[in-house]
Image (cartoon, rainbow, N blue to C red):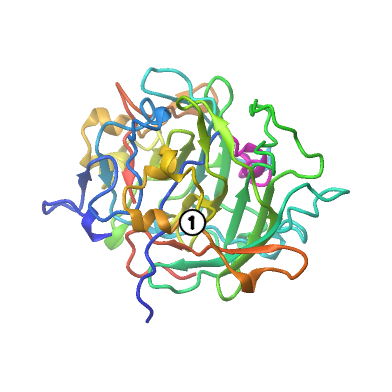
Amino acid sequence: MEEMTEPGTSSEGTVPAGPAPGDEDPPYLYPDYVATRLRAPKRPLVLLPQTLTELSGPAFGEGAVGELDHDLTRQHDGEPIGQRIVVTGRLLDADARPIRNQLVEVWQANSAGRYRHEVDRHPAPLDPNFTGAGRCLTDDDGRYRFVTIKPGSYPWQNHDNAWRPAHIHFSVFGRAFTDRLVTQMYFPDDPLFDHDPIFQSVRDPEARRRMISTFELDLTEPDWAHGYAFDIVVGGRAATPLEH
Amino acid sequence: MAPSPGLTPSQTVGPFFAFALLGTVGGELVPPNTPGAIRIEGTVTDGAGDPVPDAMVELWQANAEGRYLDAADARGFTGLGRSGTEDDGRFSFLTVKPGAVRGADGVPQAPHVDVFVFARGLLKHLVTRMYFPDEADANAADPLLSSLDPADAATLVAVPAGDTLRFDIRLQGDGQTVFLVV
């Protein structure tokens, strides 16, 4: 992104920790999200001239994901409790071109708002038929598709009576490490949006909107599952990412 | 060409990623007993100097010949590793030293690995580099290292510790690691 290029003639420069004007990303320090206070770097980030290191990215072959890795409802003997949903969308670059054959990883709480993680102390039930982790590769249109159940909201200790809006975590690799992105997909019209500092840490309302999936009747499976669409757009500073 | 749809913002990885992200990509980029294998260890600490027990460190590097993988390599050395931090903030990788990779405009760079840090409390991941302590001449000529104050450059060079290389990551405060915009 050009706006990250600092004044000066050197190819090296610094930018303030956090987003440059127009940047979609949240700042590192967002005090309402208490955990940022001791973890956000305080010193300016250093602008690195792009090199092959950052313009390369991992290649994920056919064997990278298993046959049922994309279907979180079929990873156990029985079916998980919850509202079945299809979540699908495209992984795109900033010019809306599909990014093919790249790994998309998701993880989420179960329908009661509990993660299958030893540190999650929320006293909601675990579901023996739900792990909550999925993987798939994007196809030739950049499309991914998961089948899962709608996650529940859960409390966290950030502030008094804090609840996270329901969300699914996404981790994606693009063509290059400049594209690397971890984000969260939210569901439409969640009443918790106004009360969640993680969601609100993205200051641009239009950018926040891009983290919210849309309900799509065309994506539902009649008599079986709801459908949500969520496109993911990645792009570092590279105007023309290196093709492999 | 379609207008840009707008980038998707970053959000924190949160505290509960291990069951999903650490099972399939691990900290061993090469099998044990690989000739020339090196162990890289370090601790992630926060602004109070306390260990960060719930971070994920990703390592990305060229192979020993200084080449990034292509599809043909994908079944062997991928150049990508992941390590979750333990209760004491420690992460660990087993890998090989990468060959030198030329940078922008063909300028030589010292051998290095890219290091990505994800954690609860990091709304966007952090990127840094680890350089090697036995490359004094190459490090002195490296475009990034040579542009930094010596004390800052030192945060990017691993320290020999027995038969491992130690690379600590300080998110905030005295001796904060230099983080990069890529």
Q: Secondary structure at mark 1?
A: loop
Among all residues in the image, which is located at the extreme right?
A77
Image quadrant assignment for residue B121 = top left
Q: Position of residue A61 (x, y in %)?
A: 65, 63
Mark 1 residue type: Ile
Residue extending farthest left: A8
- Residue beneath the point at 52% across and 38% down: A164
Q: Look at the image and tell me in which quarter the N terminus of chain A lies.
A: bottom left
User: Does residue A33 lie above or below A224 as drawn?
Assistant: above
Residue drawn at point x = 43 percent, y = 58 percent: A179
Residue ID for mark 1? A212
Q: Which residues are magenta?
A: B16-30
Residue B24 on the magenta segment: yes
Percent across and percent down for residue A113 are 65, 38
x and y percentages locating residue B75 in the rendered image: 67, 58
- Note whether A178 is above or below B31 in the view shown: below
Q: Chain of mark 1?
A: A
**Camera-side residue of A147 and A189:** A189
Is B95 located above or below residue B50 in the figure? below
